[in-house]
Image (tube, rainbow, N blue to C red):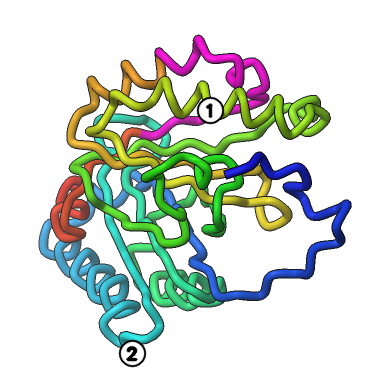
Amino acid sequence: MMVDLDPSGQVTQREADRSMRQFLNYAFFKLDPAFRRLPQAERDELKAEFLAAANGWVSDAPAEKGLILRPYSLVGVRSDVDFMLWRIAFDVREFQDAQARLNRTRLMGYLTQPFNFVSMNKRSQYVNRVEGSGHGLEILPGQGQFLFIYPFIKTRPWYDLTPHSRQGMMDEHIYASGPFKGVRINTSYSYGIDDQEFVVSFDSDYPQEFVDLVHRLRYTEASMYTLRDTPMFTCVKKDLDAVLDDLG
């Protein structure tokens, strides 16, 4: 495939794309230690109520809505968050419904949300020319035991480069990633709907492989155009009842 010489559609005045896409929400929660001072029976009751509300967002919806929920624990991994709910829907308003259900539970009185990222899935302009790369139009969440997440912003000079320059750097980036078969990337886009430009998440069963992958990518030319790629989150996949048990 040829390099896309007009990736933004600015020159050709490409028509707006209103096709249905998946929205992604990475919602991070932090527990108030006061919760752990409650009697055990009350803690169990509050967690059961929260569990029913979270799972009900998916179970109460018709299958055609395509709602997806994946819970992860960050207890003992980061100090500023305790767990994360990865929510996927075709309508961003579904995230409001999901959060409203949680807000009506008593446990939410002990929870804050230090981070909350919203993004959208779309076709990548860079990987489609690579044979076997896939179209990147559908997220397949929760394939690994770990999920590594970070918001990502490019420098403005990146957008001033020629399409050939950007594609060449991304070809190097993709080539450098090639040997790391145990890491699956999920790139989503936040232009105009959240503070970052992308949210990047990586499914894997092998944290050591992901560390080596990120290390190798630091040596690629494209990394020179990274403005911000923190905070970085290491999330451990668990059933939601196990995630809540980690809280105490």
Work out which residue is located at the far top of the displayed protein and give it: 219
State whether residue 66 is above or below residue 117.
below
**What residue is disc 2 on?**
62
Q: Residue placed at 24% from the left, 67% from the top?
A: 46
Q: Identify the mark at residue 171; answer none if there is no mark.
A: 1
- The tag earlier along the polypeptide, 2 or 1, is 2
Work out which residue is located at the far front of the displayed protein and give it: 1
Q: Is residue 220 magenta?
A: yes
Q: Which residues are magenta?
A: 216-233
Image quarter of residue 119: bottom right
Q: Callout 2, which amino acid?
A: Pro
Q: Residue placed at 78% from the left, 29% from the top?
A: 162
Distance in Å between CA atoms under marks 2 and 1: 41 Å
Image quarter of residue 111: bottom left
Judge left or right: residue 152 versus residue 166. left
Q: Nearer the viewer, residue 3 or 86?
A: 3
Q: Nearer the viewer, residue 148 or 95?
A: 148
Q: Is residue 28 magenta?
A: no
Judge left or right: residue 229 versus residue 111. right
